[in-house]
Amino acid sequence: MEPENKTYNCAIIGGGLAGLCLAIQLADEGISVVLFEKNEYPLHKVCGEYISLESWDFLVGLGLPIETYNLPIINSLGISSEQGFMLNQSLEMGGFGISRFSLDHYLYQLAIEKNVTILQNCKVNSVVQAGADLQEIDTVNGKFRASVVCGSYGKYTPSFIQKNEKYHSRINSKSTNYIGVKYHIKSDLAANRIELHNFRNGYCGISKVDQDWHCLCYLTTAENLQNNAKDVKLMEENILFKNPFLKDYFTKSEFINPNPLVISNIQFRNKQTDVGNIFLLGDAAGSITPLCGNGMSMGMRASKILARELTKYFRNQCSIEQVSTAYKKSWNTAFSNRIMAGYYLQNLFGRKNTTHFALKLLDKSPALMRRLITLTHGEKF
């Protein structure tokens, strides 16, 4: 059903984790919000589904009764090499597991309760300046206007953003193309444990989520898939199964659905907090390597930073230019070191001998291992 009012304070393109959290926070401040989601809730997404406990209090503060969901609390880590070595380490902060199918749907329902206008199955075609303080958003459901537009559209950049010169200035054409593959399985892996298993040019994470399921999600190069006749199952047998731990999970677990969810053309490009008068957050700001310390918590933290600055703007306490400057500065302060550590770890994983020797070294250097884990888990917010 199309809303009667088509002018809002803020429009958000994309209803993933960061977009929904931003919408809820702005609505709590009395700011009118419209959110455009091209799909329909609830839906599954390719995602590791482990969330650092740094985000727990934030979700509770939004109004989500997360403590009633009986979610697994994860405080144990295992990392394996293709040669069969397993490094074990406790997680000082740790995290919790919940499927994106559940979490996004809970947040969607909460946003509706807080009077956010959410248009599902609604693709955005373009965003153009319609006045000094107004932008026009053209969608399949008609045209809307908003003072501020935010992009939380995930890893795939809309065509109207790709045409922007500022966007192209940040793209590295030499970036490796990756694919992400996710299954939900039933396994005997302990509910408090997350494991990362290395294989050639990739790694796979496994941890418990809700519904008595485990999330099994891996990242690898598109080249691996191409070299196996573009057949995911064949690639798994020829490459992933060389890690004995992975072979056990794939051959001994119960798969909820035998066919995985797959996304392709993933590139880990430079980050940017705005493009073409659109503020960006979550993966829209630049795909975050999984080893940066879970992009879900980073997306939620970014929503809190941006919501704080936009609230000042709508209260006439600052200009939109000041919002842009403050958001970028706070974003860099919160994430720069974490992202840098993640890129170094990304290069360490998925290399047969290098990964094996590194894990052996870290096994004998627990203090260094704890330090690396700390870099991937931020402070509570």
Image (cartoon, grey):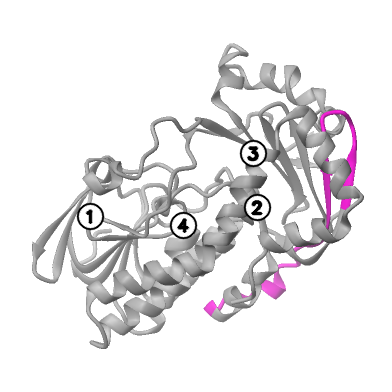
Pick the residue in front: 34 or 268. Answer: 268
Question: Dot 2, how many residues are within 10 Å of its Cα: few (below 14), some (14-19), or many (20+)?
Answer: many
Q: Position of residue 147 (x, y in %)?
A: 20, 70
Q: Indicate the amino acid at tag 1.
A: Gly
Q: Which residue is mark 3?
A: 347
Q: Residue at x 67, y 46 (%)?
A: 345
Q: Which residue is mark 1?
A: 276
For marks 1 and 4 on the same chain, the one whose residue lies earlier in the sequence: 1
Q: Is residue 79 magenta?
A: yes
Q: Nearer the viewer, mark 1 or mark 4?
A: 1
Q: CA distance from mark 4 to mark 2?
A: 15 Å
Helix, strand or loop at disc 4?
helix
Is 100 on the left or on the right of 123, as rendered? right
Q: Earlier in the sequence, mark 4 or mark 2?
A: 2
Badge 2 is on which residue?
A: 49
Q: Please name the residue shown 90% across and 36% down the image.
A: 85
Mark 2: secondary structure: loop
Single out the mark in the foreground, 1 or 2: 1
Look at mark 4 in the image and give the residue it sits on.
Answer: 282
Classify residue 253 as left or right of residue 171.
right
What residue range appears in magenta? 62-88
Q: Secondary structure at mark 3?
A: helix
Quadrant where the C terminus is found in the figure: bottom right
Foreground disc of the pair 4, 2: 4
Q: Residues within 10 Å of mark 1 (few under 14, many from 20)?
A: some
Q: Amino acid at mark 4?
A: Gly
For the residues labelled 1 and 4, the Cα–Cα distance comes to: 17 Å
**Residue at horizontal 32 percent and vertical 84 percent from the top:** 312
Q: Earlier in the sequence, mark 4 or mark 3?
A: 4
